[in-house]
Image: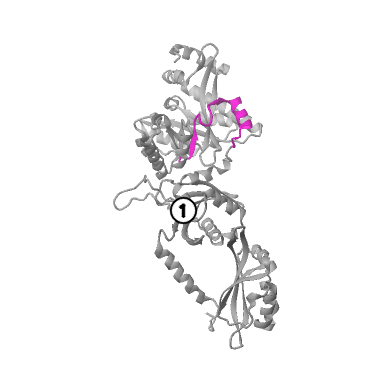
Amino acid sequence: MLHIDEQFIVDNFDDALANGAIRAYYQPVIRTLTEKICSVEALARWQDPVMGLLSPFLFINVLEKYRLIHKLDLYILENICITYNEMKENGLPLHPFSINLSRLDFDEIDMLKAISDILRKYNVPSKAIHIEITESVMLDNTAYFRRIFDSFHDAGFAIFMDDFGSGYSSLNVLKDYSFDVLKIDMRFLSDIGSRSKKILASVVNMAKAIGIHTLAEGVETKEQKTFLRNIGCEMLQGYYYAKPMDGALYVEYLSETGFQVEDPDEHHYWNEVGQINFLSPDPLNENDYTEAENGDYGFVRENSAPLALIEQSDHHVEMLYRNQAYETNLQKLGFASSKEMIKAINETEAAYYPNMDEQVKSSIITGNVVKEDHFLNGIYFTYFTKCIAQTDSKVMLAASIQTYGSDVDMSTNEMFDTYSRALIDTFDHITIMDPERNRVTARVYSKQGYSPDYSNMPLIESINRFAADEVAEEERLAFLDFIDPPTLRDRMAKISSRYLQGTFRVKCADGTFKPKVIRITKLYLDLDVKGSRELFMLTMQSISDSGN
């Protein structure tokens, strides 16, 4: 390693600042779920005309020793402001920048005032700057630094705890201070083996428990990226994505690479998504970390509950995360993979899964965990959904699934079979209509004893004949308008419903006309390998004499 005399650093520092030999280099921070840039860290680099590029390890400690570090940190902040405005002028998407502060910064000057003055000079908002602090800053005088941090928070700055895991007092610091982000130092886990993975999982779990977001720095391999994503680490930074680069190169990088920048207006949205604990046995339960009677908080478990994060925008659905337990349960429902399920949902109307669609809407409206039972491809299952974040244009749902098949729970299947047969007694008549083919697909059940077999006629003829023979004369036209097959779909879409309902007087076995509730429900059934057809179920139900 190049050796530089301390006096060389001190003697040349001011000139290096004045001549631009010291500059900010930027390394992107990537949102794990979307792989979009959500912020960047500004790092100081010194390009000396004689000695070449000087590593921060050669000059940071010297500047701290001679109490010059605050001049460097404020100079880097000015670099950030210049780059921020250059991005703005070039129409590039904006994002926050983070800057590292030293303990000695706070001893030399009023750092909050100095930072605020620079931001005001360059017209840069405080929300565009994140403050990174190492634990060594806070080892002494807890009350003093807590007041400083509170003042930074009050001024709109986010505070990151940098290099977590590299020191000896990290846990105590977490207890005493309020941080927005925990920045995990991957260097102390350079060998990402089984032991390291358990430690990292525990750290992420702990951060979720106390409401701190997580960022892993020093990510260099795809294996590290995949593991960190699977345990719920929210942000990643390292050579795997990009090395630090100067301002001009970074602007070029944003303009020419395929990386997208996260919409800053969605920062709060992603923070809410990030609070979901991927490793929890009950990830949808917001009280997951209440202490059990035996005192066991159970932060890390080998077999986590099935969990998926599903984003819905307009009529498009995207699964941003799913664990293996969720994938396994989807396969039990007949899907080859979660990708196949999402493809099917996006290519089919919501009416194909009407009960599921209603459950999602209920989750969004209430914000609570919604639990409903469903039946698909011969398998009964319970689906759990919770809306965990939303913007004006999209929502994020956390979902979990529990399947019941003959190989899992025979008693559940038997219960469904028993009570589904009993439901037949609820209706006087059940018919399946197929408007596309102009036919009655099936008369599922009837206890009306109608003379003609309406199911053997073309659908339109059947309806006209039924109206003429079975509906009270003064209600026939209204009945025909109500049941009109060609317009069923559009009328349901107009009222955002999957059914229409009306009351009409229908002939009974004794020849009298009595009011019955007639409901037409839209459904889909997998009838052949070519796909599904849009069918409608007509049900007829008597009304009690009392009207109650």
Residue 234 colored in magenta in the image: yes
Q: Nearer the viewer, residue 274 or 20?
A: 274
Q: Position of residue 313 (x, y in %)?
A: 59, 50
Q: Position of residue 68 (x, y in %)?
A: 46, 20
Q: How many numbered markers are drawn?
A: 1
Image position of 119 with respect to 202: above or below: above
Q: Position of residue 18 (x, y in %)?
A: 56, 17
Asked if residue 180 shows in the view, the reply is: no
Please identify the quarter of the rendering in which residue 16 is found: top right
* Residue at left offset 67%, top offset 83%: 469
Q: Nearer the viewer, residue 338 or 491?
A: 338
Q: Work out which quarter of the rendered image holds the N terminus and state it.
A: top left
Image position of 223 with respect to 373: above or below: above
* Residue at left offset 66%, top offset 34%: 91
- Range of magenta residues: 232-260
Image position of 71 with respect to 125: above or below: above
Q: Nearer the viewer, residue 228 or 207?
A: 228
Q: Position of residue 349 (x, y in %)?
A: 61, 57
Asked if residue 145 shows in the view, the reply is: yes
Residue that sits furthest to the left in the current view: 294
Secondary structure under the numbered disc 1 in the rendered image? helix
Circle 1 is placed at which residue position? 329
In the image, what residue type sits under mark 1?
Asn
**In the rendered view, how is the structure colored?**
one colour
Instruction: Answer few, some or many: residues within 10 Å of disc 1's Cα (few below 14, many 20 plus, some between 14 and 19).
Output: many
Residue that sits furthest to the front in the current view: 529
Residue that sits furthest to the bottom in the current view: 510
Residue 280 colored in magenta in the image: no
